[in-house]
Image (cartoon, rainbow, N blue to C red):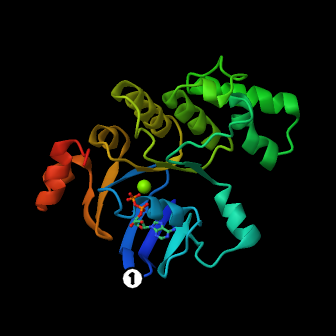
Amino acid sequence: MSERAPAVELRQVSKAFGPRKVLDQVSFRVEPGRSLCILGRSGTGKSVTLKHIVGLMRPDAGSVLIDGEDITRLSGRDLYRVRKRIGFLFQHAALFDSISVGENVAFPLRRHTRRPDAEIRARALELLASVGLGSEYDKMPADLSGGMRKRAGLARALALEPAILLADEPSAGLDPVTAGEIDELLAELKRGSSTSLVVVTHNIPSARAIGDELIFLHEGRILAQGAPRALEASDVALVRRFMASGGAG
Ligand SMILES: Nc1ncnc2c1ncn2[C@@H]1O[C@H](COP(=O)(O)OP(=O)(O)O)[C@@H](O)[C@H]1O
Ligand SMILES: [Mg+2]
């Protein structure tokens, strides 16, 4: 009997830009329905890691598997098929400025499904309500606060009910209360669904709230990996300090 493959697996992934080696044989797995937080200072390859998972970047060496399928050699329609299962909340939650908040959320549904308009609007409204924006459908993105835009971005990332959700510093740049709300939404998502999560964060309280497991990236390598408590008690001083500092560095 075969067990289910990990939702996400990196095997010995290396990536360089010119002379700069950003990822150096990075390996990890996220089991289905589990959540992984990626920690580390700026410029350590966290965003690059997420881009590999969604096939926006290809490794120089190693492989990336989604639900057991090696995506490193896929292109065109095959890569597109895999990408449709992955929601991506980008660091700057880029909403389209020229269409309403509701239509931003409806956008993936209009693009990837043939559902009738009324059904799409109803679904977008439901998604907005689930992130506390049920009365903002017709507002323009510019009229929302940063935290509200981030929540709308999350609703949009969830529109196609992705099996895997990637979020790149979802609470960065938000005040602590708003950041906490975003973390709570992600933690709820983890508890209430079978979605697998990979979340990049600078914020230790976020990582504790969201991550079943954390990895700490440093100079292209995984310096520590494990449950939050294991990282707090890490043998590696840098990791212990990062965990104790709240991670703001
Ligand atoms: N498309 C790219 N071309 C060249 N260098 C890049 C590219 N993307 C990222 N880098 C470099 O890779 C390193 C890691 O970037 P990134 O993953 O964005 O860091 P972070 O951990 O802050 O998310 C940085 O030095 C960055 O300048
Ligand atoms: Mg980044």
- In the image, is 181 to the left or to the right of 216? right
Q: Is residue 137 visible?
A: yes
Residue 132 figure quarter: top right
Front residue of this view, candidates 1 and 159: 159
* Percent coordinates x, y for residue 149 in the rendering: 56, 32
Residue beneath label 1, please?
19
* Percent coordinates x, y for residue 38 in the rendering: 36, 55
Front residue of this view, candidates 33 and 121: 121
The residue at 86%/32% (across/down) is 117
Q: Secondary structure at mark 1?
A: loop
Amino acid carrying label 1: it is Pro
Q: Is residue 4 visible?
A: no
The residue at 13%/62% (across/down) is 236
Front residue of this view, candidates 224 and 98: 98
Specify the quarter for ligand 1. bottom left
The residue at 45%/57% (across/down) is 31
Residue 54 figure quarter: bottom right
Residue 224 figure quarter: bottom left
Location of residue 213 with respect to 72 vertically, above or below: above
- In the image, is 159 to the left or to the right of 19? right
* Percent coordinates x, y for residue 203 in the rendering: 31, 42
